[in-house]
Amino acid sequence: MYTRQVAFSSDKNSTAKKISVFDTTLRDGEQTPGVSFTTVDKIEIARQLSDIGVSVIEAGFPASSQDEYATVKAIVAEGLESTICGLARSVKGDVDRCIDAGVDMVHVFIPTSEVQRTHTIRKTHEEVVSITGDIVRYARDHADKVLFSAMDATRTDLPELMEVFKAAVNAGATAINVPDTVGVATPTSMKSLISALRKEITCTIDVHCHNDFGMATANTISAVEAGADQVQVTVNGIGERAGNADLACTTMIIESIFGYTTGIKTTRLVETSRMISRFSGLMVPPNWPVTGDYAFSHESGIHAQGVLEHASTFEPGIMTPEMVGHRRRLKLGKHVGRHAVREMLNQVHIIPDEEQIDAIIARVKQIASKGKKITEQDLYEIAETVVGSGAHSRFIDLIDIAIMTGNHMIPTATVRAMVNGSEKVCSCTGNGPVDAAVRALIGTVPRHAELKEFNVSAISEGSDAIAHVALVVQDDKGQLFDAAASGDDIVLASAEAMANALNMVYRNGTDNS
Ligand SMILES: CC(=O)SCCNC(=O)CCNC(=O)[C@H](O)C(C)(C)COP(=O)(O)OP(=O)(O)OC[C@H]1O[C@@H](n2cnc3c(N)ncnc32)[C@H](O)[C@@H]1OP(=O)(O)O
Ligand SMILES: CC(C)C(=O)C(=O)O
C-alpha cells in the first residue's frame, strides 16, 4: 500500500476507497485564540472549500450568537456542492438553531469521559446515554443527516463509549464521530479504538483529532487505517489550542501514500492554505509540510544536484509540487553547490566557467555563513563582480520614487526609472502606498508583469525595524519569478524588490521589447 504512486486525484481509479473530508475551519478553526472571520470571509472560505471538493463544511455553531446563526444561514443560502453542517450541544434549543439556519447536517455532541461528564455537564454515564438517545432522535426528526460526537472519546472507558455510540446509532445518527478532544491518543491507541468500534458500528465513522502532542494528523491517518470513513480537518491545522489535523497533509497522505480518494482537488491546496493564512492572520511556518514555502525548496548542494537530475531523489515523488499547486525552488545558502548555482545563473543567461563558479560559490558561502539571507539578486550581483561587467546588466534601475498618502487621499506613487537605457516616469494610485509604488514600477516597463504574492516581515524589532519584502511576479508567459529586498522603508524595499523581479523577467526573456 505504501509504495502506490498516483498522479492526481482526478486520475484515480473509480474503485479506489473514498474517504470523506469534513472541514471544520469555520467552526473549530475559528476557536483558535484571536481568530474571528467576518461573515463575508466565511462565505468566501465556504465557497473555496466547496470548490476544492470538501464533502462536509462545518459552517459554525448557530446557537452561539445571532451573528453566527445569520452567517451559517447565509452559507446555506449559497447552495454549495458540499454538505453544510452546524454544531449543537445536546440541548433542543441548539438543535433548533441549526434547523432554523437550514443546515443539511446537525452535529450534536456530548461529553462522555468521566472528567468532562463530571465537571462540564455534571451528568452520570447513564444520563449521558439517555440524553444522547433523546437528542439524536429529536435532531433526526428534523434533519436527514445527524452526526453524533462523543466528546473526549479517547479518554472514555471503551464499554461506556460503545454504549453511548450505540444509543446514538439506534436513535438514528447517520454518522458517529470519535473526537480526540485533548490530543492524547497515539497512532497505536487510535488504531485499536477505531478497530473496536468498526466491529460494532456500521454507520460512517468520523474522527476529529487535536494536535496537543503534534499527533493530530498521524492519529487521523491511523483511524483511516483502522476503518474510519471520514476525517475532520482544518486548513493549516488551525483550531482550539494547538489546533487540528491539517487538511492538506491529511489529504495528501490519504491520496498519495494510501492510494485512496478524497475528492479534493489537490492542485488547489496551496492556494487554499494561503487564503486561510490571509483571513486568519496566522502564517504557516515555511517548513510546514505540503503547503509551507519550503515544502519543495532545496538548499543543500547534494540535494539540489540530485533533484536537478531527477526530482524523486530528494522529494517523495508520490507527491510532487504540481500535485498540490506548489513550486520547486532552489535556494541559496551556506550549503549550496555548483550544480544549483550553475543552473540558477544559466536560467538568466549568465554562463560562468568552472573557475568563476568556484569563486561565486566561495563568496555565497562566505556571506551565508555570517547568517545573511541571500537572494537571487545577490547572486547575480556576485556573478557580475566575478564574471565581469555586462554579465548582469540591469534592465530596470529605480532612480527615485515619490509617495503621497494620508487618511483623506488616494495613495499615489510616482516612479522615475532607467529602463533599458532610457528614462521613464510613471504615476499610479493604489490601495496603499506599497500597492501604488508597485503599480507605478510595473507601468515603466513595456511587457505585462503581475504581482502574484507579496510578503513582508520585520527583521529587527520596533517601529524602526528593517523590513524584508519577498514577492513573486508572473510574466506574460506565465513564468514565476521570486525576488526580495530589505530596507528600513517598507515602500522603498517593496519598490526595490519589484525592480529586482522585473530585472529577472527581462533577464530571463530574450524579447525585451
Ligand atoms: C470541544 C469543542 O470544541 S466543543 C465546542 C466549543 N465551542 C464553543 O464553546 C463556542 C461557542 N460557545 C458559546 O458561544 C457559548 O459557550 C454558548 C452560547 C454555547 C453557551 O454559553 P453560556 O450559556 O454562557 O455557557 P458557558 O459557555 O459559560 O458554559 C457552557 C454550558 O454548556 C454546557 N454544555 C457544554 N457542553 C454541552 C453539551 N455537549 N451538551 C449540553 N450542554 C453542554 C455546560 O455544562 C455549561 O452549562 P451550564 O451553564 O449549565 O453550566
Ligand atoms: C465538538 C467536538 C467534535 C470537538 O470539537 C472536540 O471534541 O474537540
Image (cartoon, helix red, strand yellow):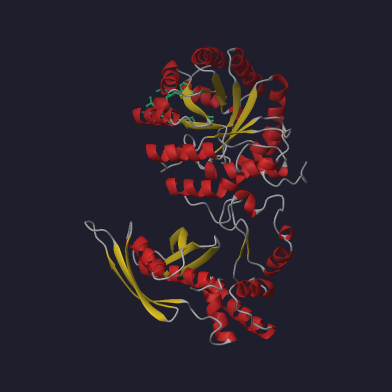
Q: Is residue 248 left or right of residue 276?
A: right
Up/down of 433 relative to 379, above or below: above
For residue 174, which quarter of the picture? top right
Q: Nearer the viewer, residue 131 or 280?
A: 280
Q: Position of residue 261 (x, y in %)?
A: 67, 37
For residue 165, which quarter of the picture? top right
Q: Nearer the viewer, residue 405 or 154?
A: 405
Q: Position of residue 70 (x, y in %)?
A: 37, 29
* Residue 222 in sight from this viewpoint: yes
Q: Position of residue 100 (x, y in %)?
A: 41, 20
Q: Position of residue 442 (x, y in %)?
A: 41, 66
| Viewport quadrant of the N terminus | top right
Q: Residue at left 59%, top 85%?
A: 387
Residue at the far bottom in the pictured view = 388
Q: Residue at left 42%, top 18%?
A: 96
Q: Residue at left 36%, top 66%?
A: 440
